[in-house]
Image (cartoon, rainbow, N blue to C red):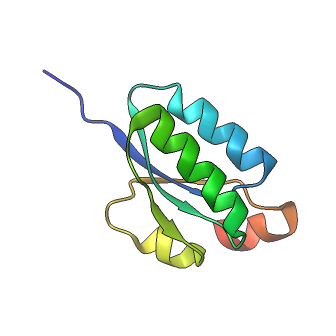
Amino acid sequence: MKKENVKIGVIGLGIRGRSLIGSLLACEEVEVVAICDFHEDRIALAKERIKEKRSIQPIVYQDYKALIDDKNVEAVVIASSWDEHTRMAV
């Protein structure tokens, strides 16, 4: 029986977020299906890396609440700055 992959969304695509995406992409059981950041350059880098490793195009958000509300996302990794992290997690 084949297991289904966990569909992950990542909020925050700075250094920490990009590093976490690299770790997530190393797990065969994980799909990064959505990403979120305010900065277009960070979004572009993350999209390129995901497409290169998995040949998929993640959904892009600039509003973290929209990513959290996405029914296709099963788990969320919050890699935002420390001053925003708690507010987003709550």
Residue 12 visible from this viewpoint: no
Quadrant of image for the C terminus: bottom right
In the image: residue 22, left or right of residue 9: right
- The answer to whether residue 20 is above or below residue 45 is above
Q: Position of residue 61 (x, y in %)?
A: 53, 72
- Residue 2: image quadrant is top left
Residue 88 visible from this viewpoint: yes
Q: Position of residue 86 (x, y in %)?
A: 76, 67
User: What residue is drawn where x is 71% and y is 54%?
Assistant: 79
User: Which residue ends up furthest to the right in the rendered image?
Assistant: 83
- Residue 39: image quadrant is bottom right
Q: How many discs appear?
A: 0
User: What residue is drawn where x is 32% and y is 60%?
Assistant: 72
Along the viewing direction, whichever of 17 and 43 lies nearer the viewer: 43
In the image: residue 61, left or right of residue 87: left
User: Which residue ends up furthest to the left in the rendered image?
Assistant: 1
User: What residue is drawn where x is 77% and y is 54%?
Assistant: 14
- Residue 12: image quadrant is bottom right
Along the viewing direction, whichever of 34 and 76 lies nearer the viewer: 34
User: What residue is drawn where x is 13% and y is 21%?
Assistant: 1
- The answer to whether residue 7 is above or below residue 34 is above
Along the viewing direction, whichever of 47 and 70 lies nearer the viewer: 47
Q: Position of residue 50 (x, y in %)?
A: 51, 42
Q: Position of residue 11 (x, y in %)?
A: 62, 60
In the image: residue 74, left or right of residue 9: left
- The answer to whether residue 16 is above or below residue 42 is above
